[in-house]
Image (spheres, grey):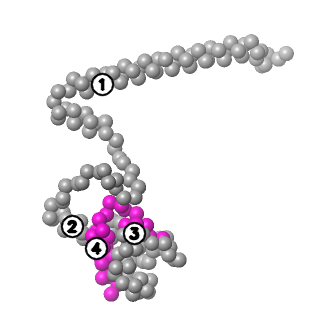
Amino acid sequence: MSDNVMSDSRFGRIFGIMLAAMAVLTVVLIIIANIIGSTLKDEMASLKDQAKKNELIARIEPIGKIAFGEPAETAQPEAAPAPEAQAEAVSGEATYNSACAMCHGQGIAGAPKFADAGAWNDRIAKGTDTLYTNAIQGFKGAAGYMPAKGGNAGLSDDQVKAAVDYIVDNIK
């Protein structure tokens, strides 16, 4: 037999040692996790001041959230924006630039390009309400696909309508 070939008994010994080492490592990791968990629990219990609790919660809060479709009905309503912010939020140009320009600026996914009267005339002829509905609810046509609210579910209907009005005003 060659020196490069490992015998079954040697393999079994090495394999057993590796399994034992992994079992010990698992036990050590579980112990460390319990220590850390109990430390955080003790820290949270010892916080008497609500501000410190809020600071800790904010520090360990996830950095982002993913939302699909409409917001959940159980979500808490946001505070109404100040009148100046509300007027700015309904700016058609600002909404267009933030949500619509990516596709309508380049004609991506069959989107009619901004200020291209030839591409928009048939759509405009169907009426403003149809444009609003298609922009808010989404639309799949022969030429392409328009996701609801341009793919930004955070936009209000008024913001989308203002963006549609901005596009139409720049075609006429």
Magenta part mainly helix, strand or loop? helix
Q: Which residues are magenta?
A: 145-172
Q: Which mark is residue 137?
A: 3
**Which residue matches tag 1?**
41
The percent coordinates of residue 151 (x first, y second) are 40, 63
Above or below, 74 relative to 167 = above
Element at badge 2? helix
**Which residue matches tag 2?**
88
The percent coordinates of residue 47 (x first, y second) are 20, 26
- Label 3 with label 2: CB-CB less than 8 Å: no
Quote the CA–CA distance across marks 1 and 2: 45 Å
Quote the CA–CA distance across marks 3 and 1: 46 Å
Mark 4 vs mark 3, foreground winner is 3
Q: Tell me which label, 4 or 1, sits earlier in the chain.
A: 1
- Which residue type carries mark 4? Ala
Q: Tell me which label, 1 or 2, sits earlier in the chain.
A: 1
Q: Tell me which label, 2 or 4, sits earlier in the chain.
A: 2
What residue do we see at 28% from left, 73% from top? Answer: 162
Q: Which mark is residue 162?
A: 4
What residue do we see at 23% from left, 54% from top? Answer: 78
Q: Magenta includes 151?
A: yes
The percent coordinates of residue 17 (x first, y second) are 62, 14
Q: Which mark is residue 3?
A: none
- Which residue type carries mark 3? Gln
Quote the CA–CA distance across marks 4 and 1: 50 Å
Quadrant (top left/top right/bottom left/bottom right) for the C terminus: bottom left
Element at badge 4? helix
